[in-house]
Image: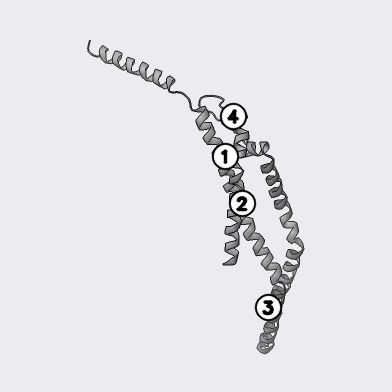
Amino acid sequence: MRHTKNIACFFFLWTVVFLSCDRADNHSTAKGASPKALENNSASEVVLPRGDNDLAASLYVELTDKTPELKGLENNIAILADSRGDSAKAFNQFDAKNHVYYNSAGRHTEQIKDSLLRVKLAFLIKNSLTKYEVGVSGHTALLRSIDAKSLALNDLHEFLKVVRTLAVIERFQKESLPGVQPMEGYLKKLNETIRQTDSLTKK
């Protein structure tokens, strides 16, 4: 329960931090050019620097390039991703060797024909494994905490990408909404052609 509260608190604090400085970032980006990801090659094409359909991610990448705080965060996240395996490598190798041994010992136990000896050895192996698991409980607890925090960071990172780019797309909507004149002109021409066509059917 306490662990769940810690994760909830982690979400809340990071959300407050990023939302609190969102206004300043939006003010600075509002002065710049329109994001390249929202530029049009034609009336129906959108340019995506990432080469895919993830417009939110493309906008976030551009925003990160212009925002030192976001760039610093992305660097930290990349460093964490690269170093996570190294942090637990020694223990994982150690733990794997121990479990390989106990599995091997279990197979040897199954080969014993004397049932009393087989039961006695199985009991000894089980006790030894239990002691081992107690001895490394601190390590395994840390690994569980790392897994939980990594999931929390991933969720918060995705949340951040959308929160920050919502302001960008909303500014784009306000500043770049096309006028209705072309559509009104087309509709006028369409109505004229309908009347012309209708008149010809009555001759």
Quadrant containing the N terminus is bottom right
User: Which tag, 1 or 4, sits closer to the chain's start?
Assistant: 4
35 lies above or below 179: below
* Element type at mark 3: helix
Where on the picture, by quarter, is residue 136? Answer: bottom right
Q: CA distance from mark 2 to mark 1?
A: 17 Å
Judge by depth and name the residue closer to the eye, 147 or 105.
Answer: 147
Number of the label disc, if any, that sits on residue 34: 4
Q: Which mark is residue 14?
A: 2
Q: Does residue 53 show up?
A: no
| Vertical order, 197 against 115 (above or below) | above
Closest to the camera, between mark 1 and mark 3, is: 1
Q: Nearer the viewer, mark 3 or mark 2?
A: 2
Mark sitting earlier along the chain (3/2): 2
Task: Say whether residue 91 is left or right of residue 52.
Answer: right
Q: Which mark's residue is nearer the viewer, 2 or 1?
A: 2
Q: Residues within 10 Å of mark 3 (few under 14, many from 20)?
A: few
Q: Nearest the camera: 126 or 46?
A: 46
Q: Residue at x 31, y 17 (%)?
A: 194
* Residue under numbered circle 1: 165
How many numbered discs, if any?
A: 4
Q: Secondary structure at mark 1?
A: helix
Label 4 to label 2, Cα distance in Å?
A: 28 Å
Residue in the image at 59% along x and 66% along y: 2
Closer to viewer: mark 4 or mark 2:
2
Discs 1, 4 touching: Cβ within 8 Å: no
Label 1 – label 4 distance at C-alpha: 13 Å
Q: Which amino acid does the dot numbered 2 rest on?
A: Trp
- Picture disc at residue 130: 3
